[in-house]
Amino acid sequence: MSASKSLPARPSLDSLRKQAKQLARASAAGDRDALSRVRAQLPGVEAPLTQRNAQLVIAREYGFAGWQELTAEVRKRLEQGRDWALGQAEVAIHDRDVERLKQLLMEHAALLSWQEDGRGLLGKATGTYALDVGQSPERERDFTRAECAELLIDAGAIVTPSVCEHILQQRAKGMLAMFQRKGLLPRTLEFFAAVGDLDSVRAALDVSGPPQVHEAFVRACLFGHDAVAALLLERSLVLDPELADQVDATIGRPAFIGCFVATRPEHIREVVGRAKTVGLWKAFVVEEVSRAAEDGEVVAFVDRLRREPWLLSDEWVNFQAELLGTPRQEIIVALFDLDPAILRRRSPPPSQAIEWAVMHGNTHLLPLLARIWSVPDDLPYAAGLGNLARVKQWFDGAGALRELDAHYPYNDPRARGHLGWEPPTAQHVLDVALAFAVVNRHFDVADLLLERGADVDTKWNSHEPASILHFLVFLPNPYESMQYLIDRGIDMTIKDYRWDSNAVGWARFGKGDEKLAQWLEEAERQREQKR
């Protein structure tokens, strides 16, 4: 077997099959060149050539033992090429590089049908880089990629139901209007309500049950369609007379609508889901309690729970667990004083409350939270608690980390997922431990971790690749921890993926804290002067 050809970078199976057919035809016709090629690869085979033998000749000419080995290599290269093109397309979408995306689609048509994540590239373009973009047209323009989405749609990208659902979830009004203009939205009551199509809403009411009506009502509120919301509320009150009594006896219908209009971005998914599954009244009450908890309004929080004791029952332990994720100690104490069912659960629902408390510098909450969940015994949590002795015990005599799979985030795919930390490594554990130590101002622990190999320039952040300095921007009184990192030489030019901004930009534009932004700039200048 001798190779006389080389596969191109992006080979085609169709082309190779055609080459085999052409060889078989040419050899059958007595073509001298074709017969010479056959004899070179299959000396004992006479014409006419079978398709199988023709494919074998082609495979050997490319240096493969057989057709199966050749096609396996082609598929491997095509998959690698697709993966490369996908990565390039995602970068083009993020950078709003429409011309680059157009070129990639022309060269890799399979990108349009890629659906590994359920939403494909169209999901990358319609997805937002913020929790909620419905607050203003400017926010939607900054955090979506409408021009890339339209290119993908016009090129024939598959539009899955989850793409449309995600647009609703993020309140991307401009994107929703584009999908409506192109006739891509599902013709359901929920979407009619979201776009404010009053006539279609009326037509769909007669064939819609209470869950669909409740869900559509919330969508109409979230998208600011008052007339549609009023119509859907009236229908809900007819379907549920008890709801009518509750609303009319308390805040009244206009204020009830206003409550849903003012749903906080981080609550949208839960409010919509609860409206559909447990009804509008309970969805309303839960939102009121959540707001009181987040705002630290203890009197209102306790008063509402006492008037709605079903929220303290075993059926609502998942919501009780959500409330315990608050950073407000007075709310947690007030909830425990009401004796919620979660206190008696042998197996409490999973929660990130412990993780959030350590991550955000609220370790004073751990004695309370430990009544429900145990604090993990591993390196990052020992670092966050400032337990230097325990931190040292996690390293062996050579300085290597013991029991790697016992540590967060090595053992937590969710925590690594949004950072792109795959596969998990010991470095990830060290870097998170460093972050936890710095956030909680345990600088002796942080110094030890740096000695053990933690990276001060790690791209760790709570929910996306950035830096520890970026994360500190949004914590109260971050100056001491920031100064520690600056003194240890952190790279202050590190930019995040979403905003393409350094920590100064996060402070100035993300948080709107000009004082902090200027402090960071001055701290960097002073450091440079000392070098």
Image: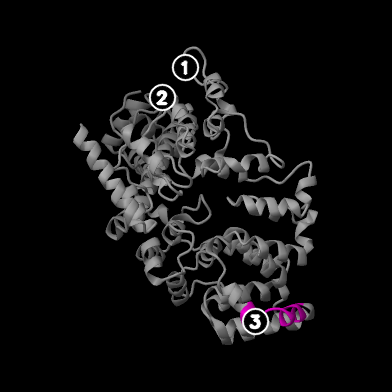
Q: Amino acid at mark 1?
A: Gly
Q: Is residue 190 magenta?
A: no
Image quarter where the C terminus lies is top left
> How does the figure colour the protein chain or chains?
one colour
Circle 1/circle 2 CB separation < 8 Å? yes
Q: Provide residue 148's location: percent of width, then percent of height.
A: 36, 62
Q: CA distance from mark 2 to mark 3?
A: 59 Å
- Magenta region: which residues? 243-256
Q: Provide residue 443's location: percent of width, then percent of height.
A: 44, 31
Q: Is residue 220 left or right of residue 143?
A: right
Q: Is residue 248 magenta?
A: yes
Disc 1 is placed on an element classified as: loop
Q: Amino acid at mark 2?
A: Gly
Q: Residue 214's mark? A: none
Q: Provide residue 316's location: percent of width, then percent of height.
A: 75, 56
- Neighbours of disc 2 within 10 Å: few (<14), some (14-19), many (20+): some
Disc 3 is placed on an element classified as: helix
Residue at image position (76%, 55%) is 338
Disc 2 is placed on an element classified as: loop
In the image, which is nearer the foreground, mark 2 or mark 3? 2
Q: Provide residue 74's location: percent of width, then percent of height.
A: 40, 38
- Neighbours of disc 1 within 10 Å: few (<14), some (14-19), many (20+): few
Q: CA distance from mark 1 to mark 2?
A: 9 Å
Question: Can residue 356 be seen in this snapshot?
Answer: yes
Disc nearer the start of the sequence (3/1): 3
- Neighbours of disc 3 within 10 Å: few (<14), some (14-19), many (20+): many
Q: Is residue 501 left or right of residue 367?
A: left
Q: Amino acid at mark 3?
A: Leu
Q: Residue 232's mark? A: 3
Residue at image position (34%, 47%) is 503
Q: Residue 399's mark? A: 1
Disc nearer the start of the sequence (1/2): 1
